[in-house]
Amino acid sequence: MAIAFDNSYARLPPHLYARIDPEPAPKPRLIAWNAALARDLGLPEAPEDTRAAVFSGTTLPEGAEPLAMAYAGHQFGGFVPQLGDGRAHLLGEVIARDGTRMDIQLKGSGRTPFSRGGDGLAWIGPVLREYLVSEAMAAMGVPTTRALAAVTTGAPVWREAGRLPGAVLTRVAQSHIRVGTFQYFAVRRDVPAIRTLFDHARARHFPQAETPADFLRATVAAQAELVAHWMGLGFIHGVMNTDNCHIGGLTIDYGPCAFMDAYHPETVFSSIDQFGRYAYANQPQIAVWNLAQLATCLLPLMQDDQDAAIAEATEIVHGFAPLYEAAHGKQFAAKLGLADRREGDDALLQTLLDRMAKLGADFTRVFHGLRTGKAAAEFREPEAFEAWAADWRTRLAAEGTSEADAKTRMSRANPGIIPRNHRVEEAITAAVAGDFAPFQRLHTATTRPFDPAPGDADLMDPPRPEERVQATFCGT
Ligand code: AMP
Ligand code: MG
């Protein structure tokens, strides 16, 4: 398979990564292929077994220069000076048809010098979860890494649950640079490497940013947009460690992530998030905390006067709050079908959310129900919704928005189909047993999230009590 690689990260100084080949798979089998993304990337057509061999790391395409990127990170607030790609291999970069330089990375492809005690592998569960959720996010317009391929390796992976089928995900992104990538060099006081990384990341994400301060401002703005988008969809990332915080504002590292079913601001799914650090409502604050870590890394590149640099960086990080507030307001204005934001809108939204929380209403179904006129049915006490809806209609009328206009606005803000946790689990369970039909069906439906088809009704249903997923687990 002749891929036109053009690898720029591999040209950076060698201490930014470790060169290492992926582990060949004994019996690679392609289980998902993103043909549209492959076309966008300008990849050549190739037979299925060739793609399975290439995207499991078994056959190295010409021009690939596999490497594991070095990074550090704050995990649940505690700093780990060395993490890095412990089970991922950047094969190389290609220039997509729209001119964007894109990374092609394998995940679950074997050990690297950053594996620490890990086996470098992934089982099919986290691979399919990331494939489903990242592609659904892309379809909903959320900045995200993409999924190009999923391949089973034919080798077993051992986890707490026992022997599981091994798999490799091919991830595509504008880069895989994280806040933690900067932290790796900052903690080593390697200012030349920070500068190199800054130049590289700037070129790939924010070429208009002339200075490190501009770059920080751009990352802050991108993260504010991103987290507002998550909040608008009831998405909980689950592990917002700085090593999972993308410099270009992409959603990255889908681990124990999940969409809320019943709305509650304190919702947490991740089994390892004992104290709810990464609960739904905490996500904006955590983003600020992560951005403050990035700011600290960039200080040596900012003004010579450290006090002045600190003051400038602090001001930029504080800029998150108004940007987030505006982005969040815009998200929810669209979700309510409103054309603009007015005084009282925050209170209107809060009243709805409070009633949803109190009455255990389903986040996605309520907002989708505003589109279809069926929201009241989502409340145990429909009167509570109706009382709110009267104020909502008054507000729509006040700006002259007709019901049809409101519906048009909501039609691209309020998805009907999301990869619900219990459906993702169901698809994974079936896949482990060798049946990929539930995965395919869920993938097809969630990549047209705003346009449910008549046969999708069961995918839109909230989980029955016995189907409710209480905890999600990291991909490890
Ligand atoms: P994650 O939880 O996927 O964000 O990963 C956190 C860190 O653990 C990263 O450095 C990963 O590369 C590493 N890691 C996770 N799972 C494995 C594994 N199975 N083998 C080796 N390293 C891993
Ligand atoms: Mg990670």
Image (cartoon, rainbow, N blue to C red):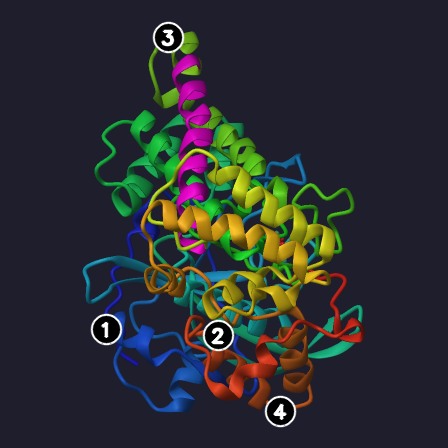
Q: Earlier in the sequence, mark 4 or mark 3?
A: 3
Boundaries of the magenta span: 311-335
Of helix, strand and loop, which mostly describes the magenta segment? helix
Observer-side mark, 2 or 4, equals 2
Position of residue 421 measured from the top left corner of the image (x, y, whole percent): 65, 69
Does residue 231 appear in the picture of this structure? no
Pointer 2 residue:
446
63 and 169: which is toward the camera: 169
Mark 1–mark 2 CB contact (< 8 Å): no
The residue sitting at 40% across, 67% down in the picture is 139
Left or right of residue 40, residue 369 in this image: right
Q: Is residue 179 left or right of residue 378?
A: left
Q: Is residue 347 visible?
A: yes
Quadrant into which the N terminus falls:
bottom left
Position of residue 93 measured from the top left corner of the image (x, y, whole percent): 31, 61
Residue of label 4: 435
Foreground of the two, 236 or 171:
236
Residue 6 place in picture, x, y as percent: 25, 60
Secondary structure beneath dot 2 equals helix
Residue at the disc numbered 3? 305
- Kindly report which numbered mark, 1 or 2, lies closer to the viewer in this rendering: 2
Q: Is residue 59 left or right of residue 237?
A: left
